[in-house]
Amino acid sequence: QVQLVESGGGLVQAGGSLRLSCAASGRSFRTYAMGWFRQAPGQEREFVGSISWNGEYTDYADSVKGRFTISRDNAKNMVYLQMNNLKSDDTAVYYCAADRTSPYGRVWDTAYDFWGQGTQVTVSS
């Protein structure tokens, strides 16, 4: 079992930056790929990006590529989502998730086994 807790959300102006953190419990964390997803009001949850268990491989949605960066520190049981040049379309609740099966992370949310409670990101234009 892995428990995940996101933090770092808030209100930011368009063009600004935020860094989200995801704290994980359990030693198994370092063997899991991790993903970030987001859900805006009235919309389905969508893939933002993923990172492999060792941090060597990352994947991003086209909508955030070049603006967002995922990293992890397995020694601290942490995953991060650095978000730059934020746009109003980035407003959503952001979730981190753990994938026990794939070493690289996957784009569909049903592949992930553990989820955090989410953190709100609001970008004002």
Image: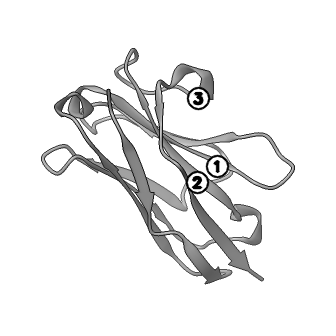
Is there a contact, CB below 8 Å, between mark 2 and mark 1?
yes
Identify the residue at horizontal 28%, vertical 48% (top origin): 72
Residue tagged by mark 3? 107
Among numbered discs 2 and 1, the one appearing first in the sequence: 1
**In this view of the protein, which residue sits in the foreground, 36 or 7?**
7
- 6 with respect to 94 (left or right): left
Q: Tell me the SS state at disc 1.
A: strand
Q: Tell me the SS state at disc 2.
A: strand
**Which quarter shows the N terminus?**
top left
Among numbered discs 1 and 3, the one appearing first in the sequence: 1
Residue 33 in the image: state x and y as whole percent.
Answer: 36, 30
Q: Tell me the SS state at disc 3.
A: loop
What's under tag 3, amino acid-wise? Val
87 up-or-down from 58: above or below = below
Disc 1 packing (10 Å; few <14; some 14–19; many ≥20): many
What's under tag 1, amino acid-wise? Arg
Residue 65 in the image: state x and y as whole percent.
Answer: 57, 51
The residue lying furthest to the right in this view is 42
Asked whether residue 108 appears in the rendered view, the answer is no
Callout in the foreground (1, 3): 1
Alpha carbon distance from label 2 to label 1? 4 Å
Callout in the foreground (3, 2): 2
Q: Using the image, tell me which numbered label, if any, was put on residue 38.
A: 1
Disc 3 packing (10 Å; few <14; some 14–19; many ≥20): some
Identify the residue at horizontal 44%, vertical 56% (top origin): 6
Q: How is the image coloured?
A: one colour
Residue tagged by mark 2? 94
Asked whether residue 11 appears in the rendered view, the answer is yes
